[in-house]
Image (tube, rainbow, N blue to C red):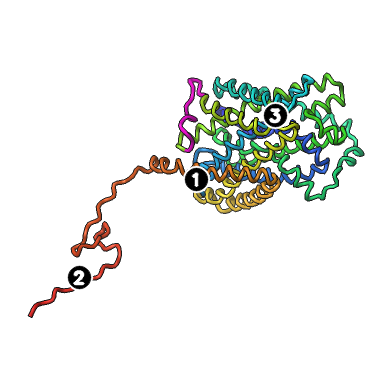
Amino acid sequence: MAKKSKKMGVRQMTIITAVNMMGSGIILLPANLAQVGTISILSWLVTTAGATCLAYAFARAGTFSNREGGMGGYADYAHGHSGNFLTNYTYVISLVIANVAIAVATIGYGANLFGATLGPWPTAIAVIGVLWLASILNFGGARRTGNISQITVWGVIIPVAGISIIGWFFFSPHLFAQSWNPHHFEIFHAVTASIAVTLWAFLGLETACANTGEVENPKKNVPIAVMLGTLIAAVLYIVSTSVIGGILPVRAIANSNAPFGLVFAHIFNPTIGKIVIALMVISCFGSLFSWQFTIAEVARSSAVVGYFPRLFKRVSKAGAPILGMCVITVAQTAISFMTVSPSLDKQFTVLLDLSVMTNLIPYLLSMSALMVLQHVEHVSDKLARKANIVAVLATIYCLYALHTTGTTAIVWGGIITFAGWGIYGLVANNLNAREAPAKKIPKEPSSANGGPRSLNGEPPYPVAPTPEPMLSR
């Protein structure tokens, strides 16, 4: 009897891919998109196309790459150590910022759950408390983090899938049309205004390639699973946010700190609304909990190879990078104070734009390295050509998305990126010395006429012949 494979099939990998993206990415999206109108469905379509291209390109890179380090390993093929460092550096910065945004969303839903109204400073203090709680709970190691995350993610899947099905019985096409473009934006402007918000929901699609070694027939199944997972998430995102736009007035959605709770309370009753809010608080905190550990792990793996300070690679007996998590949470504490705003939604949007901007840098570095990666790994021309075309399309989308994050995010994100090159200069010498110890260079032999010679005895450059001595008369 054939031995049953312990590896994942395409269905399991598809579910993991979709779940990794959904986490907390959607819980405040209806409120953000409502500020533009239901026309934001066009942004979803553009972002879905771009995210699908990114997912496919990452799937190919994950299938063929033989270098560790995820996106940093991909970038290393074309950009060397500096590209590897810059990819991991900007990715960590992006996640650090993103987790503050997730904490803001958690507090927004939590305050709504308990009927509390928090001012700017109480909100900041609550956000900081949630961040530290998530870090401390991760001190138990990766296994505990994984087990808890698998449970908490259902807190967002149930409401989102539920409204995507039930919501159509309460959907008003007239209300949807009335909310289409309340601010009378031009179509291009309306689409552009929502791109960064919709891309935020897809951040995390790159993590799907991490399980390549545990999948049956990865060359075939990983690309299928990544693309299907991305499309499943896209359908749930588009359907859920669109159906809400046909149930509630756009102004009510835009002013809500818990739009999913609001719509369930409208359809059923306030109690059901509170239950949905509670589920999403659990999911949001679970996502924050999981990503806090992920950031510390990315920093730890970078520290192991010499890119990040040594303190990040220290782990406890449970395998948790506790010191690294504490340093990261201190940085998030500072960011929380810097983004204090009278509006929770405004605070969330500022963090969202900056996180998306910095996350696009590793995307661009990875996409630009795919051609070299496939060449080095001897991928057939037919397979490589298709993936390269998709990577070019993904790059174009990333550049467009970069533009949509706004001047403030680009300026601050640019400063963060440029600082990364400076920081790399501080570690590059030690890294190179570690990989290639200095070799003893043989002393150059001298020629008979006193000129230097190369190691094979030939002059390294033309040497004028020594003149014959003149005979005296």
Which element carries disc 3, helix, strand or loop? helix
| Mark 1 Cα-neighbour bin, 10 Å: few <14, some 14–19, many ≥20 | some
- Residue 472 position, x and y percent, is 8, 78
Give the residue pinned by disc 2. 466
Give the residue pinned by disc 3. 104
What kind of secondary structure does the magenta stretch mostly adopt? loop
Give the residue pinned by disc 1. 82
Q: Is residue 64 visible?
A: no
Task: Name the N-terminal-most of marks 2 and 1.
Answer: 1
Which element carries disc 2, helix, strand or loop? loop
Which element carries disc 1, helix, strand or loop? helix
Stretch in magenta: 307-320
Q: Quadrant of the N terminus?
A: top right
Whether 310 is among the magenta residues is: yes
Please identify, in this view, whether the residue under mark 1 or under mark 3 is nearer the observer.
3
Task: Name the N-terminal-most of marks 1 and 3.
Answer: 1
